[in-house]
Amino acid sequence: MSTVSPLIAGNWKMNGLTHSLDELSELARLLTTGESPRALVVVCPPATLLAAVAAQGASSGIIAGGQDCHQEPHGAHTGDISASMLADAGAQYVIVGHSERRTNHGETDAVVCAKAEAAIGSGLKPIICVGETEAQRDAAEAESVVSAQLAASIPDAAEHHEVVVAYEPVWAIGTGRTPTRDEIGEMHNAIRARLVDRFGLSKGEGIRILYGGSLKPQNAREILGIANVNGGLVGGASLLAKDFYTIISAV
Ligand code: PEP
């Protein structure tokens, strides 16, 4: 079984103005005055706050991450941001292929893969999101859908660079619903098997597999204790320092 060290990432999505940094300061205070966290802590704010999060992280250990990057290094892409710009602002990780990007921006596995490659090329670690819809789970297609996403969204470059996989059932994101313990365990085991098949035992066992989807203080201990769950990707519950810290402390 994989013994990779855990990582908890907060995805602020399109939430957060300058005053939200008060929550970040509170998180930093909790992390530096309480028991040392057993997980790496990543916060992915809107791009406007990246530099501030990176600066805060310098003293508290919080690592800054982007929420998305363009697959091209630069050019005429109004409103987009490149991986090297994220790195320049202090990011070390970037989420790619979040279901909100796949759904709202029509991102295919090929686009997600290109974004992950761009991230790696700029020295960032991509957090590559996969997950089935409710209809796919009801049709007993969850595992085949996720396997296909993994195969097509993770670049070959992952063999030599650090990548993170986040399993996020689309129907659990922001809904308050979560899969059962067995469902999460089965999917994480299946993902681990796919990673080992593709990258070999040592690399495949070393890739973190995060769970995301309505992870909150009340269920964190149970979910984060499941085999092959190497941490979490947290949306709503990452906005309040107290809640996010409780999840981090549940590792
Ligand atoms: C997410 O959007 O990545 C997520 C997991 O959201 P939430 O925790 O709010 O379900």
Image (spheres, helix red, strand yellow):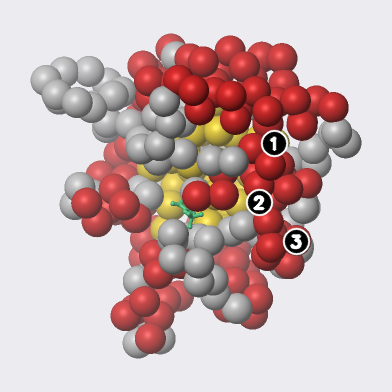
SS label for mark 3? helix
Q: Which of marks 2 and 1 is nearer the N terminus?
A: 1
- Residue type, numbered disc 3: Arg
Image location of residue 50, percent across then percent down: 46, 21
Q: Which residue is labeled 1 in the image? A: 40
Q: Quadrant of residue 144?
A: bottom left
Residue drawn at the location 60% of the way across and 62% of the way down: 192
Nearer-N-terminus badge (1/3): 1
Look at the numbered discs 2 and 3 and tell me whether their residues touch, using CB distance below 8 Å. no
Query: Which class describes the residues within 10 Å of circle 3: few (<14), some (14-19), or many (20+)?
Result: some
Q: How far apart are marks 2 and 3 (CA)?
A: 11 Å
Q: Report the mark closest to the observer, 2 or 3.
A: 3
Alpha carbon separation for disc pair 2 and 1? 9 Å
- Give the residue at x 73% y 48%: 246
Mark 3: C-beta under 8 Å from nearest atom of ligand 1: no
Percent coordinates x, y for residue 215 in the rendering: 59, 59
In depth, the one of 122 and 176 nearer the eye is: 176
Indicate which disc residue 231 carries: 2
Point out the image quarter for the N terminus. bottom right
The foreground one among 161 and 52 is 52
Residue closer to the observer: 164 or 66? 66
Residue 156 in sight: no
What secondary structure is marked by label 2? strand
Q: Are marks 2 and 1 in contact (CB under 8 Å)?
A: yes
Dot 2 alpha-carbon crowd within 10 angstroms: few under 14, some 14 to 19, many 20 or more: many
Residue 221 circle label: 3
**Residue drawn at the location 16% of the way across and 18% of the way down:** 75
Q: What residue type is labelled 2?
A: Gly
Image point (44%, 59%), residue name? 174
How many circles with numbers are drawn on the protein? 3
